[in-house]
Image (cartoon, grey):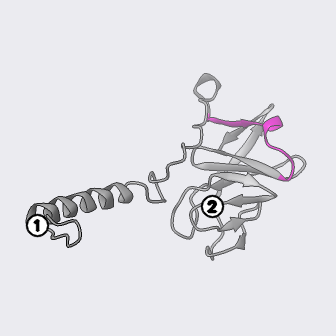
């Protein structure tokens, strides 16, 4: 093969197409959304004492004006002593929200942000996060 006038033979074209297909397949494995994010999943709730409802968090671990993501639940504390349970699935495309920061529940997939009560603050989401029942038992926040 002349370096000044490269000619692609069939073997080179087939090998290149295979490499391109492999790269595309690997890229598809890193998409956002349910189970597709490269981020680690939120910690799962701990089993409740004596087989009771799962303990989502300790009250001291949920800051006033903030919250925590535990499994498929977001627990927020908009005002002192008021705890709110929200579904962690973003209403825009179904991605799991990953953090509560700066007073909002934030979805890293497309930038939606929700208030601590689940209301939409910033789109593209147009529907609030679904609420989930939570209650305080002693110093713990439990599902239900």
From the viewer's side, name the closer residue of 100 and 38.
Answer: 38
The part of the image, by quadrant, that contains residue 104 is bottom right
Q: How far from the left and from the top, in percent, is residue 100?
A: 73, 53
Residue appearing at x 44%, y 53% in the figure: 36
Query: Which of the two discs, 2 and 1, labels the residue nearer the N terminus?
Result: 1
Compared to residue 89, the image places residue 93 above or below, namely below
Q: Position of residue 72 (x, y in %)?
A: 57, 48
Query: Could you tell me which residue is drawn at 54 percent across and 47 percent down?
Result: 39
Tell me which residue sits at (71%, 37%) in the image: 57
Question: Would residue 65 be found to the left or right of residue 142 on screen?
Answer: right
Q: Which residue is drawn at 81% across and 58% down?
A: 103
User: Distance between the Cα atoms at labels 2 and 1?
Assistant: 48 Å
The residue to which callout 1 is attached is: 9
Q: In which quarter of the image is residue 108?
A: bottom right
In the rendered structure, the answer to whether residue 94 lies left or right of residue 113 reads left
Q: Is mark 1 on a helix, strand or loop?
A: loop
In magenta, the rendered stretch is: 53-65
Marker disc for residue 107: 2
- Location of the C terminus (image quadrant): top right
Q: Which of 43 and 37 is in front in this view?
A: 37
Q: What element carries label 2?
A: loop
Counting from the top left corner in percent of width and height, residue 54 is at: 61, 35
The location of residue 89, given as percent across then percent down, is: 56, 59
Q: Residue furthest left?
A: 10
């Amino acid at each position: 093969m002349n370096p000044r006038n490269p000619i692609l033979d069939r073997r080179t074209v087939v090998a290149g197409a295979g490499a391109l297909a492999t790269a595309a397949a690997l890229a598809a494995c890193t998409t956002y959304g349910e189970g597709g994010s490269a981020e680690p999943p939120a910690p799962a709730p701990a089993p409740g004492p004596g087989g009771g409802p799962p303990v989502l968090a300790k009250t001291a671990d949920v800051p006033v004006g903030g919250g925590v993501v535990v499994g498929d639940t977001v627990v927020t504390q908009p005002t002192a002593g008021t705890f709110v349970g929200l579904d962690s699935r973003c209403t825009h495309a179904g991605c799991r929200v990953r953090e509560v920061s700066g007073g909002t529940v934030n979805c890293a997939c497309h930038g939606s942000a929700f208030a601590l009560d689940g209301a939409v603050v910033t789109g593209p989401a147009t529907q609030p996060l679904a609420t989930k029942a939570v209650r305080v038992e002693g110093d713990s926040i439990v599902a239900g």
